[in-house]
Amino acid sequence: MIRVVVADDHAVVRQGLTGLLDSAEGLTVVGVAADGREAVDLVREHRPDVVLMDLQMPGLDGVEATRAILAEDLGAEVLVLTSFSDKARIHAAIDAGAVGYLLKDAEPADLIAGVRAVARGESPLDPRAARALISARSAGDGTDREVELSPRETEVLRLVVEGLLNKQIAQRLGITERTVKAHLTSIFQRTGVADRTQAALWAQRHGL
């Protein structure tokens, strides 16, 4: 059973998400938060597998809540659920350690699949938002910039191309699986791809 905490400041949204997730096989909502601070407290109390996190909330927002949850290493992964217009906060949430993001107009089946993907150790990214974020990041002077991965991101991507799983990559590089996931999320964001297969193809096209 995948245990989920839902964090959103709109009661109707919270109720809708709770009903949707509780009706899906293998998912259960163990806590519902109206703001970021409450979300952190619920994660401490219930130790869920996944936190479905809105970013625009009063008090402690979703970005800071994500950072707090991951800093305490509470065993939960954060999946951001936000609006298409919230690009700056999506960037910040990924930098804070969120493993993926979906848009609030996603189909219910895609949302359920996204939660399950996070629980499997994957990083679901809405392709529409990914393209927009990459374009925004590369369009500062009106021209495309080359994608620049860090040395560690390059190492991780090369091992993905070899077909290694997250646990194997972590062992090979002497880092944690959580760190591998964070690097993969950054790679997906920077290259504009949505999954490991696309990332491997991107790497091959660019001679990595």
Image: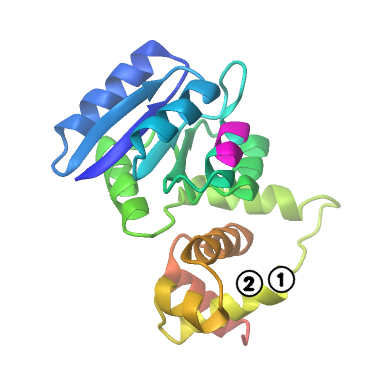
Q: Quadrant of residue 37?
A: top right
Quarter of the image with the C terminus is: bottom right
> Is 19 a magenta residue?
no
Q: Residues within 10 Å of mark 1 (few under 14, many from 20)?
A: few
Q: Are marks 1 and 2 in contact (CB under 8 Å)?
A: yes
Residue 57 location, x and y as percent? 56, 20
Question: Tell me, what colour scheme is on the image?
Answer: rainbow
Most prominent secondary structure in the magenta stretch?
Answer: helix
Q: Quadrant of the N terminus?
A: top left
Q: Which residue is mark 1?
A: 150
Who's the residue at 39% across and 76% down the image? Answer: 165
Q: Which mark is residue 153?
A: 2
Q: At 34% from the left edge and 40% from the top edge, which residue is drawn?
A: 48
Picture layout, residue 56 above or below residue 203: above
Q: Where is 94 relative to 103, above or below?
A: below
Q: Residues within 10 Å of mark 2 (few under 14, many from 20)?
A: some
Image coords of residue 132 (percent x, y): 60, 47
Residue 160: horizontal and vertical position, in percent? 47, 78
Please report the bounds of the magenta region as a residue range.
Answer: 64-68
Helix, strand or loop for disc 2: helix
The one nearer the camera, 51 or 191, is: 51
Residue at 41% over, 35% down: 52
Q: Is residue 157 left or right of residue 102?
A: right
Instruction: Give residue 26's mark.
Output: none
Left or right, 73 with respect to 207, comes to: left
The amino acid type of the residue labelled 1 equals Ser
Q: Amino acid at mark 2?
A: Glu
| 169 is higher (above) or lower (below) than 111 | below
Q: Please identify the quarter of the rendering in which residue 183 is found.
A: bottom right
Residue 104 in sight in this render: no
Asked if residue 198 is positioned above or below residue 141 in the image, the reply reads below
The tally of labels here is 2
